[in-house]
Amino acid sequence: MITAEAGTLFRSTDRGRTWTKEAVPYSGSLWGGLALRGGGALVFGMRGHVLRRTGEGGWTDVPTGTDRSITGGIERADGTVILVGLSGAFLRSSDGGRSYEASVRPERQTLTGVAEGVPGKLVLIGMPGVVKDIAQQK
């Protein structure tokens, strides 16, 4: 997938040889995406928008509980989805991206990515590099 401005999303099913534009229920900027282990996908971007796709179905705009833009994410081995974004946005989903618990990190750093750290920890990445290595909370 390639995400872009004005709700533009391109998808390839042949390893990038050809691309098709997909219709999504959002006309704002999309900044990234994440393939899910179960065959679905998430794309995310401005104002807290997260779109979820299951299998060959269409895209659904999922309420996130935040209007802070989302810039990065991971799906952990246990299926938990973590999304991060501007001004310390931190979203957690324990149901494959169908719903989210949103919070704001106390340091309020703009977060651009998240990665697995040592067992039980997440590494938050921001503009200056590694922002914080945090314990994964249930």
Image: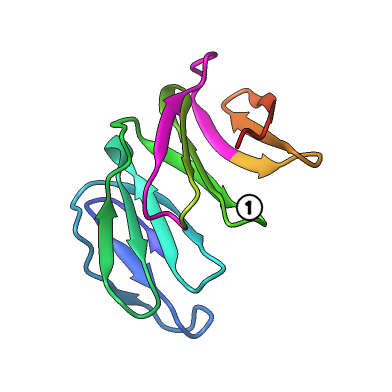
Q: In which quadrant will I find the C terminus? A: top right
Residue at the image point whose x is 50% and y is 49% from the top: 94
Q: Name, please, the residue furthest toward the top.
A: 107
Q: How many marks?
A: 1
Residue at the image point whose x is 63% and y is 52% from the top: 76
Left or right position of 30 against 127: left
Left or right position of 101 against 113: left
Residue at the image point whose x is 45% and y is 82% from the top: 13
Q: Nearer the viewer, residue 30 or 35?
A: 35
Q: Nearer the viewer, residue 32 or 39?
A: 39
Residue 78 position by quadrant:
bottom right
Q: Which residue is mark 1?
A: 76
Q: Report x, y in % for residue 118.
A: 81, 39
Colour treatment of the image: rainbow
Q: Is residue 30 magenta?
A: no
Q: Which residues are magenta?
A: 96-113
Residue 37 position by quadrant:
bottom right
Assign the magenta stretch its main secondary structure.
loop
In the displayed structure, would residue 51 be above or below residue 130?
Answer: below
